[in-house]
Each structure stands twice: as structure tokens, then as C-alpha cells.
Image (cartoon, rainbow, N blue to C red):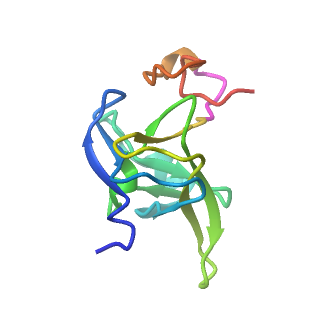
Amino acid sequence: MSPFSNLFLVRSSAIHGLGLFAARALLASTPLGSYEGRRLTASEVEAADWDSGLTYLFGLSDGTVIDGGQDGNALRHLNHSCNPNCEAVEEWSEDGTLQLGVVVLRDVTEGEELCIDYALTIDESCTPEAYPCGCSAPGCRGTLVAQD
């Protein structure tokens, strides 16, 4: 059992599908754990057939990608918000592997959905409108794509 399992639970989300919710009040800077999953190279990601439309991919600065849909944990259910209450932070493990930790940005109340800003990067052949946002947060930018 994860030492973080008492911090959150997975349930139906008004934003999208399943979401991650605070199981109790959480203070800013509380670590929620590491985003886990199969490690992929950029070429493996490009070669894969992503026909389901639902992916749990998280790109890291070293060029690797974590696929939370394969051997992942509950953190894969973090939905996007343009006004997030959590953030993903890269950390180096003792064995030299780049990890992705998730940390609470501000105090949250019990039952509040925990969200990050996906800040997607897209190539020139796509438009931000192809990645609509459903967060309904004040100041929602209408897309999952990162702001310039």
C-alpha cells in the first residue's frame, strides 16, 4: 500500500471521467507521491497506436515519457485545470532516474478535486482548439495547451 493512499481517492469527476479527490484537508506543499508507469522513449510514443483517445502520458525533460496507463498508479487520474491546485515536479531518484512528483500548490479542502495544468505542447500542424478544456475554472483558457 502506498504511504500516500490516505491523502486521496479516485471517483467520478465533473471535469472528465475519473478524477483524484482529497480524502482529507491538505496543506500547500503536501507531496501526493510519484507519477508511475512504464517508461517510453519518444520514438516508442510515436510508433504506438493511441486509438483509444484516452492516454496517461507525461513527458519529462530528459525526453522520456511515463505511460501511467501501463503499470501506473492513482495519480494518473489527475485531471486538468486552468487554475490547478497541484503541480508536477521533476525529481532525481537515488538511482539517477528522473521521477515525477506531484505536490499540492495551495491548501485544499476534503473532497476537492486535485488537478494539475496539463500545459500540453503541440506541433504546428495542430491547433489549441483541438484540445478543448472542460475545467470550468475562473479564467479558463479553453484549451489543454500551454499558454505562450
Q: Position of residue 93 (x, y in %)?
A: 60, 78
Q: Position of residue 86 (x, y in %)?
A: 54, 47
In the image, residue 61 sits, relative to residue 83, either above or below, namely below
Task: Inspect the magenta stretch and tell me whether residue 122 lies in it.
Answer: yes
What count of labels does the image hold?
0
Residue that appears at 49% across and 23% down: 131
Q: Magenta stretch mostly in which secondary structure?
A: loop
In the image, residue 119 sits, relative to residue 124, either above or below, namely below
Q: Position of residue 78 (x, y in %)?
A: 42, 45
Residue that appears at 34% across and 33% down: 53
- On screen, residue 131 versus residue 12, left or right, reads right
In the image, residue 27 sits, relative to residue 12, either above or below, namely below
Residue that appears at 54% across and 41% down: 85
Task: Inspect the magenta stretch and tell me whether residue 113 lies in it.
Answer: no
- On screen, residue 50 versus residue 138, left or right, reads left
Q: Which residues are magenta?
A: 121-127
Residue that appears at 63% across and 35% down: 121
Q: Residue furthest left?
A: 12
Give whichever of 80, 105 is nearer the camera.
105
